[in-house]
Image (cartoon, rainbow, N blue to C red):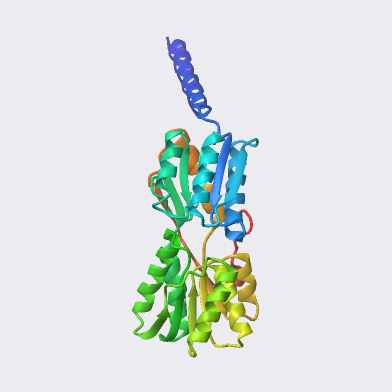
């Protein structure tokens, strides 16, 4: 009798395992489409590489297509249409416009594709994995305010109006508002999220404002461009802070630049997490929260030596 029971329970366990493996095999990850702001930005290249590495641990033969929207809404719509035509299983999207992208996302979901927003939110996505951007803006601007002893003229060098940038600027403004001695001279110029954009914006500020003490740039490429413009116009004693913790900013923090700090992101881990969450969703596993916020840490001249960076897997 006991033997029969044991055999029955073994059979049950085996059946359960088989049904689990059959369930896992229901939806193999065969193809994934990734659309990001700009593959000219090392941050987005790292997102694409991190996602690909994770996808290949799930299926070594997975087809990964990474494209650059170049912050062009129409281009991103076309890219999503192409992913749908290619029958990808999952789309990772860094949305050009978090609201306007919704029809494209709905179309992808109607085609049975899981959509995960990365780095910025996107209306209609199954889940979002991003940095806690409000916190990142707070960290960078708190450091800026302390460096200026709570007084001086500063500029918030804005960027493309995606949720990540809006959150960073809001975080920054909250902190600066607590310092009545700090005057914000400009906060609405879009420096395009690029080195060239940062350089052009800073040239304009330095021409307009004879006294400028600090700049918060919304990302590292803009901060590097901002520093170059200050050098060209031989302006010193300006504190620059930003967000990303990119390899370029590590170099800047270790050399003679005006860049003093950057609130870090971890695009490699972010992309890996996004693929994991997406694969779970493909197989009916919902994350406990559909908004996954990754914490930011401040990288400064003092601690850059011990910073791990994000140019490679952790």
Q: Is residue 146 above or below residue 122?
A: below
Quadrant of the snapshot with the N terminus: top left
**x 58%, y 81%: residue:** 258
Q: Can residue 55 be seen?
A: yes
Is 161 on the left or on the right of 269, as rendered? left
**x 55%, y 40%: residue:** 82
The location of residue 63, given as percent across then percent down, is 62, 38
**x 62%, y 78%: residue:** 228
The location of residue 67, given as percent across then percent down, is 59, 49
The location of residue 187, given as percent across then percent down, is 42, 75
Q: Is residue 296 above or below residue 126?
A: below
Q: Residue furthest bottom?
A: 210
**x 39%, y 69%: residue:** 171
Instruction: Pick the residue in front: 36 or 192.
Output: 192
Q: Is residue 200 above or below residue 152?
A: above
Badge count: 0
Q: Residue furthest front?
A: 74
- Tell me which corner region of the image, top left, top right, bottom left or bottom right, holds residue 61: top right
Q: Is residue 225 above or below residue 206?
A: above
């Amino acid at each position: 009798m006991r033997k029969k029971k044991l055999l029955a329970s073994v059979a049950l366990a085996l059946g359960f395992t088989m049904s689990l493996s059959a369930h896992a095999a229901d939806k193999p990850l065969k193809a994934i489409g990734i659309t990001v702001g700009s593959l000219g930005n090392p941050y987005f290249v790292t997102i694409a590489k991190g996602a690909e590495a994770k996808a290949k641990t799930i299926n070594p033969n997975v087809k990964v297509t990474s494209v650059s929207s170049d912050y062009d809404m129409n281009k991103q719509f076309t890219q999503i249409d192409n992913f749908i035509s290619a029958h990808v299983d999952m789309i990772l999207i860094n949305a050009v416009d978090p609201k306007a992208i919704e029809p494209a996302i709905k179309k992808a979901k109607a085609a049975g594709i899981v959509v995960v927003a990365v780095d910025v939110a996107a209306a209609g996505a199954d889940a979002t994995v991003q940095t806690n951007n409000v916190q990142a803006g707070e960290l960078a601007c708190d450091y800026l305010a302390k460096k200026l002893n709570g007084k001086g003229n500063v500029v918030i060098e804005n960027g493309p109006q995606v949720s990540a940038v809006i959150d960073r600027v809001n975080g920054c403004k909250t902190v600066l508002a607590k310092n009545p001695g700090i005057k914000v001279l400009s906060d609405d110029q879009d420096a395009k999220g690029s080195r060239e954009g940062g350089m052009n914006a800073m040239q304009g500020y330095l021409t307009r404002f004879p006294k400028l003490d600090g700049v918060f740039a919304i990302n590292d490429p803009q901060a590097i461009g901002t520093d170059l413009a200050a050098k060209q116009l031989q302006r010193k004693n300006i504190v620059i802070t930003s967000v990303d913790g990119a390899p370029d900013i590590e170099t800047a923090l270790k050399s003679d630049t005006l860049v003093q700090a950057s609130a870090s992101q971890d695009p490699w881990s972010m992309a890996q997490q996004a693929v994991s969450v997406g694969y779970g969703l493909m197989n009916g596993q919902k994350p406990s929260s559909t908004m996954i916020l990754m914490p930011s840490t401040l990288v400064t001249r003092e601690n850059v030596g011990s910073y791990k960076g994000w140019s490679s897997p952790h």
